[in-house]
Image (spheres, grey):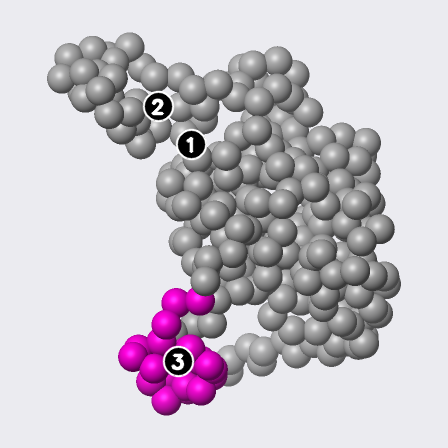
Amino acid sequence: MTTDAPLIFDATTLPSNDNVNPYAFSVDLNGQWFLQKGKMIAYYGQIDFQGVGHGRLDRLIASSFHSPLHAADWVVAEGHGKLLLADRAFDVNSYDLDDGNLTVRSGNLLAFEPSLSLKQSIIPGFLTLIGTGKFVAASNGEVHFVEPPVRVDPQALVGWADCPSPCHHYDHEYLKGVMGGIRAMTGMGGASGEEHQFEFVGAGTVLVQSTEVLMAERDTGAVPQQAGVPGGGPGGHGGQGGHGGQQSPQLPGQLGSLQRRFGL
């Protein structure tokens, strides 16, 4: 009985700005890219990683990054080589914008070219890319493209392009009776797509993932809590401090994790 040998890549055989498989993407870096922390799994070549806000990158930040709430979640990769991007074995794909605009869930966006300008969406938990260039995003399952008018389960929504921002839609039966009264008093409820949807109208494209389950939440760039990983658990030595490891101070850019966790 024979088994297929694993496919082994090197710097010359990795794809150029294309998927290695459904779960990893290879960026042919020749200059600069913005990366969300924790999404680079390997690289070849001479590449440096600088935090957003470093002095010598001020001009790049001023032209391409306009989301202070998420600044602590991102770095700039600079140099020449091949970058391998992935996110916990979720589906990964690249998309091209041609003088367009696309709003995407902030936790799903892995990387983008500096020719695109990133802005903070008025919808909590989403970011907007404007201009011409390539970006890489992850999803929990395959992404489907649909045209408005359409109503989408909030947990299945990945983003939307070249169309107005959505509004909330609550089914009439859900607003009546006991549950309607509870929601009126507390503002809670409406988590299910059968009760609450995002409604899109006008021209454009909506990106929907093939599951109603959001990508599993994890602090951006966090060290896995596992033995043997420096700073990651029993036996680790990563400066977490005693008493089971103290939490590090919360940075402003990490406030978006609350919004992403609840799919807002």
Q: Position of residue 232 (x, y in %)?
A: 41, 78
Circles 3 and 1, Cβ within 8 Å, touching? The answer is no
Residue in front for this viewpoint, 6 or 251: 251
- Looking at the rendered structure, the kind of residue marked 1 is Pro
Say the numbered circle drawn on residue 196. 2
- Looking at the rendered structure, the kind of residue marked 3 is Gly
Q: Position of residue 245 (x, y in %)?
A: 36, 76
Name the residue carrying label 1: 154
Element under disc 3: loop
Element under disc 2: strand
Q: Position of residue 243 (x, y in %)?
A: 29, 79
| Above or below 6: residue 163 | above
Q: Is residue 246 magenta?
A: yes
Circles 3 and 2, Cβ within 8 Å, touching? The answer is no
Residue in front for this viewpoint, 186 or 137: 186
Name the N-terminal-most of marks 3 and 2.
2
Q: Is residue 235 visible?
A: yes
Circles 2 and 1, Cβ within 8 Å, touching? The answer is yes
Say the numbered circle drawn on residue 241. 3
Say the numbered circle drawn on residue 191. none
- Looking at the rendered structure, the kind of residue marked 2 is His
Name the N-terminal-most of marks 2 and 1.
1
The mark closer to the camera, 3 or 1, is 3
| Above or below 246: residue 182 | above
Residue positioned 68% across, 62% down in the render: 51
Q: Which residues are magenta?
A: 227-248
Element under disc 1: helix
